[in-house]
Image (cartoon, rainbow, N blue to C red):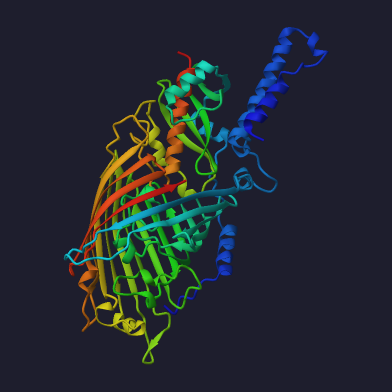
Amino acid sequence: MSIRRIALILAGASLLPISTASAQEPDSARVAELERRIDAVTRELERLRLGRDVVVADTALPGFGPAASKVYRVNQGVSIGGYGEFLYENFAGTRENGATAATSDRFDALRAILYVGYKFNDRLLFNSEIEVEHADEIFLEFAYIDYLLNENVGIRGGMLLAPLGLVNELHEPPVYLGTERSVTENRIIPTTWRENGVGLFGSNDAVAFRIYLMNSLDGAGFNATGLRGGRQKGSKALADDMGVAARFDYIGTLGLTVGGSVYSGETAHDRELDGDPVGGRTTVWDLHFDYKVRGWDLRALVAGATVSDAAALNRLNGLTGVDGVGESMLGWYVQGGYDVLRGVDTGHQLIPYVRYERVDTQREVTFGAAANPANDLTVTSLGVAWKPVPQVVWKAGYQIHTNEALTGLDQWNVQLGWLF
Amino acid sequence: MALLIPLRRSAAVALLAAAAAALPVGAQTLTQDEALALAFPGADIDRRTAYLDDAQMERARSLAGGSVAIESGIVTYYVARKDGHDVGVAYFDPHRVRTLPEVLMFIVGRDGRIRRTEVVRFSEPPEYRPPDGWLGLFEGRALDDELSTKGAIPNLTGATLTALAATGAARRILALHAVLAPLDP
């Protein structure tokens, strides 16, 4: 029953004749009684609007003090959210070197996601992201239980998003500029990177941190283009090797996030080569800057990775020559946009943006191997994002791809994204 | 990393249970009484309810702006009095963030500007909760174009809906306050 309906019923009840006897009472008494009833109705209405736990005075439950009793009165319930994106990609007919390209254009129902959470009490909650990719692939992108030790620190366990970079944890299209995520946060930080684990998280008004113990990447999936194939995505994940991911951000200035993150773990999961164990320690790090102020949306990120025992991993993976995983990788980008409608009396936002990015996933390769110059690339993205409301975005953009092999292929894209 | 064995779900649950037994409760929700005492220490609080007519509703909606909903004409507010004078008024605004409700308390001063904002109820996951520093941006704000996520109130990265809900609530309360003019001149 809606609050409006309940209010009407209560208000109607308050206007009923007080009683036959009271009708004979002096007017002042009747007015006082009506005032009492109206006051009771408005209190009840307020209680319904705000919630019983807000309006009811603090009282102790048996065996607990008032503060300790609060956990028994907290709000519970299911929370649902979501986001998604459609992406149209139109590729040029010729490559950077003039060669004919036969890459087909694509129109993809790239992602449709539901967030489902449940709050057991003020300290314990469940949160999850269930994703349909490309219209026919289903993934669990995260699912965890949070337990708040106090208002600033909590324990988190389940399938966790690796807390690296700017996009891996916040990847809803209206949140970032660009029709596609950056290459750095695709190949070096393999967004969306999620693994099973447990850890601590916390924040106050000035800083935020997360530190997780997670099942490690699987080195069997690495290749010359980066670490993306090493994600286990929580599916029967090999856990002979575990990794540690940590992040620290300064958030003390509103709109500004600046910080860094690191991940390290062995990735061979007890595999051996010629009778010798292989470690394959992989370390990924990043430094990032994000500042949104008065219409400006500014970002910069640099990320790197090192893979030890790359030669052994390449042999285990059957990778030779220029196809081997790099021992060292580096990528960075700078990006800026401005809402040109900021000074206009409208709820719409129109944000032209530019991103310049350099990535090399074979910055260093194993002794005797060669790097594929196509993996040393530059992407310049120009585009515009239109948000009729902050949760919905249309983006159109042009990407100029160049690389050391001169095989870059430009493309223009249109993206429709949303979150709720 | 052979020394680090995988944590099983049961182990994680046991860890949580142990922590629950050992640590104090960290409450996230204020009661109305607590919030009012926090805002007006030592003041007398007078609870009042206003019943807006159609013209007042229309004016409030116009002042708040088209994107801000004002659905009820029954407005309860709390006037604080000290030394025989009205010193401010508290409004409690319930609204939805994603799918769950939030209640914010706004204190409006004699100058018609927001003096304080407190979260008294927040049901979404804590990462969507507005930080105190961000809520502090409402302090001193009047009902003008700057009271907007396109103006002086920056969006919360990753919590856009929280920012929109709170900014809309601030505009709604200041619009109602302007129509009600509840404080003694």
Spot occupied by residue A367 in the image (x, y as percentages of width and height): 22, 83
Q: Nearer the viewer, residue A267 or A263?
A: A267
In this rendering, the answer to whether A9 lies above or below A118 is: above
Q: Is A259 on the left or on the right of B18, as rendered?
A: left
Spot occupied by residue A351 in the image (x, y as percentages of width and height): 29, 42
Spot occupied by residue A202 in the image (x, y as percentages of width and height): 44, 54
Q: Nearer the viewer, residue B185 or A255?
A: A255
Q: What residue occupies the far right of the structure in this picture?
A: A21
What quarter of the picture does the N terminus of chain A occupy? top right
Q: Is residue A254 visible?
A: no
In this rendering, the answer to whether B89 lies above or below A220 is: above
In this rendering, the answer to whether A194 lies above or below A206 is: below
Q: Is B156 on the left or on the right of A225, as rendered?
A: right
Spot occupied by residue A369 in the image (x, y as percentages of width and height): 22, 82
Q: Is B43 on the left or on the right of A350, as rendered?
A: right
Residue A42, image quadrant: top right
In this rendering, the answer to whether A354 lies above or below B65 is: below
Q: Residue at x 44, y 80 (%)?
A: B2
Q: Nearer the viewer, residue B31 or B128?
A: B128
- Count of picture labels: 0
Q: What residue occupies the far bottom of the structure in this picture?
A: A275
Q: Residue at x 50, y 41 (%)?
A: B97
